[in-house]
Image: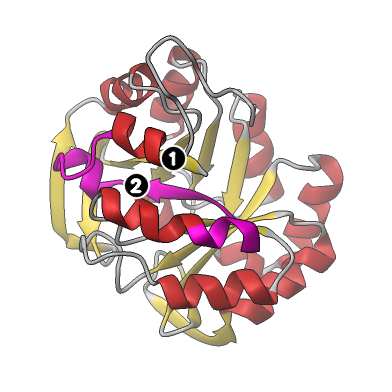
């Protein structure tokens, strides 16, 4: 199972929010590039970058910082937050981003996802952010009646092979991932699922491992890593990733 450190960017800094609330922010690095370098040095095989300003504004705000990270690290980088047009996604992919994550636009303009999957097969992820099983959009500020499973099925029909599923109520809380919701989603849809939200320590990685045969292929960790409740090297060992510092997991390049 892939362990993917999160680097959330707001106003040019690496931060973490609780429940996606900008009023509940903790700054962990003034320079997000340093955070990215740290996780790569500790063995990360992929990084998860989020432009929080972009998610709230509806368009990318930290593309320059993201491009600098991409040029600095050698591991694949996936990026989300405010990517709501074909042009915005193409720009990031042209800057060297490995995969882009489409969230709001998957609900409001699914034809964008369809076209991107045609142009960039295997490089389009859909982010499904759910509150009580229902999809939330526009930086988690707007709830919809759409069920997470229904959206995932629609996206499969358009060519999306990978989903990042975030339980909003767990995000940034260190309360543990929503195992049951992940199990239900992974059982119901054909995509590979990356779990996000709530990871608090090594035991949560162990709890997620039985879901791998169902299709949960990775987990994003943020708060637990930054507060040192979870050591990345330990998480990688538990997940069957990097056993020591001499190797890098570049299998998902």
The residue lying at 34 percent from left, 39 percent from top is 235
Q: Residues within 10 Å of mark 1 (few under 14, many from 20)?
A: many
Q: Nearer the viewer, residue 94 or 235?
A: 235
Q: Residue furthest top?
A: 246
Contact check, label 1 and label 2, Cβ < 8 Å: yes
Q: Is residue 168 above or below residue 233?
A: below
Q: Is residue 164 visible?
A: no
Q: Quadrant of the C terminus?
A: top right
Q: Residue furthest bottom?
A: 145
Residue pointed to by mark 2: 221
Could you say which quadrant of the image residue 105 lies in?
A: bottom right
Q: Residue furthest right?
A: 118
Q: Position of residue 2 (x, y in %)?
A: 51, 41
Q: Position of residue 166 (x, y in %)?
A: 44, 64
**86 magenta-colored:** no
Horizontally, residue 9 falls left or right of residue 210, namely: left
Q: Nearer the viewer, residue 216 or 143?
A: 216
Start and end of the magenta stretch?
210-231
Q: Is residue 12 above or below residue 75?
A: below
Q: Is residue 209 visible?
A: yes
Q: Residues within 10 Å of mark 2 (few under 14, many from 20)?
A: many
Q: Nearer the viewer, residue 193 or 109?
A: 193
Q: Position of residue 87 (x, y in %)?
A: 68, 42
Residue pointed to by mark 1: 4
């Amino acid at each position: 199972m892939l362990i993917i450190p999160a680097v959330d960017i707001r106003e040019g800094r690496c931060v973490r929010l609780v429940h996606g609330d900008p009023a509940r922010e903790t700054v962990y690095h003034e320079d997000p590039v340093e955070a990215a370098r740290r996780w790569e040095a500790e063995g990360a095989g992929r990084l998860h970058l989020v432009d929080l300003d972009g998610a709230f504004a509806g368009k990318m705000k930290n593309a320059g910082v993201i491009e600098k990270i991409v040029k600095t690290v050698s591991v694949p980088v996936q990026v989300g937050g405010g990517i709501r047009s074909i042009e915005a996604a193409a720009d990031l992919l042209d800057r060297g981003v490995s995969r882009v994550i489409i969230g709001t636009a998957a609900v409001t303009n699914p034809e964008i996802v369809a076209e991107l999957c045609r142009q960039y097969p295997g490089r389009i992820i859909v982010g499904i952010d759910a509150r009580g099983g229902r999809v939330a959009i526009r930086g988690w500020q707007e709830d919809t009646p759409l069920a997470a499973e229904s959206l995932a099925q629609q996206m499969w029909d358009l060519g999306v092979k990978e989903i990042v599923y975030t339980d909003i109520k767990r995000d940034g809380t260190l309360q543990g991932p929503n195992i049951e919701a992940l199990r239900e989603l992974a059982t119901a849809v054909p995509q590979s699922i990356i779990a996000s939200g709530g990871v608090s320590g090594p035991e949560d990685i162990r709890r997620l491992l039985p879901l791998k045969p169902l299709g949960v292929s990775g987990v994003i960790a943020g708060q637990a890593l930054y507060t040192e409740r979870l050591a990345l090297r330990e998480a990688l060992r538990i997940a069957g990733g990097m056993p020591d510092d001499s190797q890098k997991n570049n299998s998902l390049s």
